[in-house]
Image: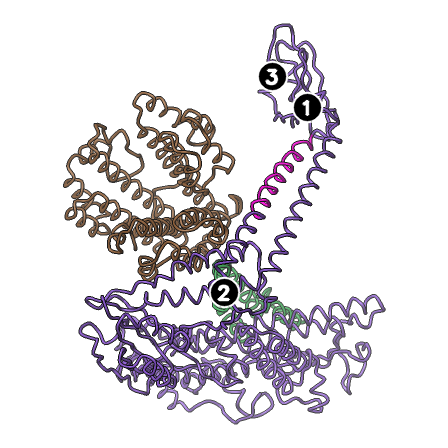
Chain colours: A green, B brown, C purple
Amino acid sequence: MFDIAPQVASLALQEGTSSGPAITSTGMAALAVGLAGLGAGYAERGIGSAAVGAVAEDEGLFVQALILTVLPETILIFALVAMILA
Amino acid sequence: MSATGSSNPEYVNARVSARRATLFDEEDYRKLLRMSPDEISRYMEESTYQGPINRLGSRFAGVDLIEYALNAGLAETFDELLAWADGRLYEQVARYLRKFDAWNVKTAVRGVYADTDAESIEDDVIRAGELDDDLLDRLVDAESIDAIVDLLEGTLFGEPLAAAYEVYEESGTLVALENAIDRAYYENLFEGVTTAGAGADSAYAEFLQAEIDFRNARNALRLARSGADIDPAEYFIEGGTLFTPEELSALSRNRDQLVERIRESRYGDELTGALDELTEADSLIGFEHALEGALLEHARNAAHAHPMSICPVIAFVLAKEREADNIRAIARGTQAGLDPEEIRAEMVVR
Amino acid sequence: MSKLSVTGSKRVMGSVVELVHDQHVLDVSEYDGSWEGFQPGDPEAEAEAASEKLVTVRSIKSILDVDAEAATPQSITEAEIEAQLPEIQDAVNELDDRRDTLREELRGIEERLDAVEPFVELGIDLNLLGGYDSLEVAVGHGDYDSVERELLDAEGIQQYEIFTGGDVLAVFVYPSEHAEGVLDDALVGAAFTSLEVPDSEVAPESYVREIESEKQGIESEIEGVADELAALEQEHASFLLAAEEELQIEAQRAEAPLSFATTENAFVAEGWVPTEHYEGVAATLKEELGDRIDVEEVERAQFKSDGEAVHEHGEAVADGGTTIGSDEPPVVQDNNGFVQPFEVLVNAIGRPTYSEFDPTALLFLTFPLFFGFMIGDVGYGIVYTAIGGYLYTQFDSPGFKSMGGVTIAAGLATILFGVFYGEIFGLHLVSEYVWGGNAPLHKGLIPEYSYWVPGWILISALAALVHLNIGYVLGFFEELQFHGLKAAVVEKLSWIFAMNGLWIFIASKWFENSKPEFIFTVFDSGEKAAFALGFGGFPVIVGQAGIALFVLGALLLGFGAPAELVEIFDALVNVLSYARLAAVLLAKAGMAFAVNLFFFGVAVTGEGEEASWHFMTDHAYHVGDMYHGEPVTEIMFGGLMHGGLASLLGGILVLVLGHMLVLALGVTSAGLQAVRLEYYEFFSKFFDGGGREYEPFGHERQFSRQD
């Protein structure tokens, strides 16, 4: 989740001087990343909650819990790919 | 934690499934059945009852230790459930766990009725539920049923008990009081649970209906068996779907019809084994165990189908209670010198 | 692993148990009750007494909170336990009871203290608040106005007075003649909850002082009891630990028959031993007990299943299966020192079973590579390595040690990649000093090198193809061995065809115009090729062959299980998922850049796609200045370092905290993403886990000696 911020920031930096439509394709891509992040975050809310519960019962589940929690990040990866291609 | 905040079934159910996995299984029971009470308490210490056994182990031994540890273990586990849950889930769990309030009140009433000393009543009290320790202590110490009714004024059992007390005074049997307690509990349980729709809530409602249906069937059979001249309809608990009070009193006199009725209902599939057993074995105990097994399975199925509802918690509560009953049966049976096969018949393992 | 079976008369059962226990190599199998006429055994008689004492010992241990660290091993006998335990038990119980009583008293006092608090606020002597004949008094929390209104409305009140202190009210009422309880009646309607007046004659403050001194007295008594308990702990810790161990061993031995199959006079016991130990155990048993027992190797399982299982029928096996329980052999992983720490990562998913390939070595080869690629920084790498070294050397727990080992490997890989990227803590110093300003690899954050980004995405995809193919091939061979050629082809080869075919098509010139351009440029030649390999895409015909292969794979898959066909896009998705390597690489680089940007500031030379960013590590630049022979076109940020002392101090804080944050997020993003690729994308191709740990029957004495 934290990974997007600098991406978007660097995008904004690159976009500084251009002019054109209100939202450029890069801007749209950034939006896509943001929305994907929102989606991933929402998905992770439930998983994270369950993961914390499972770990509280059995510390040995820590690694699995972490992995399951970050599974939804995949959607962000696709968003990032879309952004780079845009 | 509290009734505020949003419901957190993910967290609670993750913990509950982990706990479920630690319940004793077939292999554990196979070993326990061959152990002496002291070995059983050691086995418990090495599993989920470590806390209670360690707390009580320097003072008690044998079956006593097991019984105390089981009750303490149940209370501990169910208090944890409440500590985990938030929001609406908390509320539902708390309402369900009031069955221990009902149990404790019944225990106190029975104790006074049978003139049991306070200490033995205390032993049977399970300190889960909403009634606080102070009140429980006073219930245990109460000298008369009248006093118990007074103490419960203002709780959900207050009014129904007061009303039933008059009946009790006339008849002199506890049935009215016990029934009033059950009814108060189930009425409270249904508040805020919708039966409509197909969501998690209706799954819960369906489970509660099953619990009530099974309880009605059991009560009717018990009454019919006892030969007492009491109409089962009077002790009918509202909320089930299978019977009306009138039907129940008719069916209780003809067990074959009752069995047939259940067989045709939506519980038929789950209860096939139990029903066959009942027709064949002709034992009420066998049927009650079968019913209990069926309810456990029903709860587990509901938990499986609705992982985001309260159902997994309920399924766990039932399974945990059953575990305690099983261990108790083993400990008592072993002490009474029964052989493993005989004790096995007293247990419900699902 | 070999399955050892011992059959004998019940008279020697105890000796067998003792011998096997001493050997400490047999992982006992449970009797599953499947043999006609064979019951699980009953525990030996000693089990009961040992258990009873064991429960007591453990309970005392927990009450005393015994510390195992400080204990010294001591010799112990049953007689000693018998003699000493009751004494300790009584002493502990008595102290514990006393502590309970005292705590109860303390609770009572605290309640009284809470109850008197409002009266302190009110400030009226307690004896003035009651005991009148002609006055009615009520004290409580409430709303002044509401109370007053009710009093004015009420009948039978001649006079009233309300005193307040904080939010506490004391209401005094002088009722009319013959009127009784008027105050209570009046207050029913008011917003008022009454408090009980403590039973005391003095001013509330002195009453509080009284209670508090009482409280202190009890608290110090509790402390006294705690000291006594601590003294008991000191005195008996070693004894308790030794007794626990001795009793535990006794109970373990006495209960061993629970796992055996027994008849009236005979027993059968089975368990797994590492094959190399089999002869030793069997010989010892034979030597000691001779003809009274029969020892056999009834089954042999070898890791990786290339050895055939030996199934022999023992004499005692009349019906049912050949063994008393059909359990899987336990698994002992066997990896060398460097690879071994990665077992912790594999075991987090599950111990490999006998039929599976142990992927630990592959994890050792790929995980640090992924991690190092994503972080790729000499500075961070050194820190990670140091943390790993600390964990590895300073902890005894195998879990921490293993995590330390994994972290060291990841850290070293990070350093290695850092050298190639030429970065240390996000600065390009390594590039300058090692590579003369021209590192061989670029992360692609700086616009000048942004053409590397698509390159990294393709590299990620290539890594994915290699990684996943290994997974599928392993899966293929496992299927081949256990479910035959057909299963291996439809379940694994199908995927190999589909995935490789699809990606050959993607890398081909067929439909070139509908594909992103970079596929054909990054490995080509010329200025914009990150890796000048001269590869401009496969010819059209190869692409068509790729699609054919893909379709063939899909058909095979559908042939095996039509429902699986919907999963066919995993051939695309699983590979794309590795793009996280490139994504995290950029994100980490971006974060490190941002931290350094705040501190050093950045001067920009060139414009647009040609722009280059430079940290102003030596002094501040201005637009128009020359930076290494290039005119500065823009100052992205001036840098806290160049803005006076306060700014410098703030900047240092940002620098340190910022880099720490990047380090920590490096673990959660790079570490987790790498591990996820291993577990989810890679393992799912061939690995299920679920192997059983090898737990030999016996006990390693720690606290007790037998003389």
Task: Identify the main secondary structure in magenta.
Answer: helix
| Chain identity of mark 3 | C
Q: Earlier in the sequence, mark 1 or mark 3?
A: 1
Can you identify the residue that label 3 sits on? C186
Magenta span includes C56: no
Residue B176, percent from left and from top? 32, 28
Query: C309 above or below B114?
Result: below
Residue under the image location 44 percent in, 54 percent down: B49
Can you identify the residue that label 1 sits on? C144
Toward the viewer: C229 or B218? C229
Image quadrant where one finds the N terminus of chain A: bottom right
Residue C244, percent from left and from top? 49, 63
Image quadrant where one finds the C terminus of chain A: bottom right
Labels 3, 2: front one? 3
Three-letter residue code for mark 1? Tyr
Q: Are marks 3 and 2 on the same chain?
A: no
Three-letter residue code for mark 2? Thr
> From where the camera sits, is residue C180 visible?
yes
Can you identify the residue that label 2 sits on? A69
Residue C419 location, quadrant:
bottom right
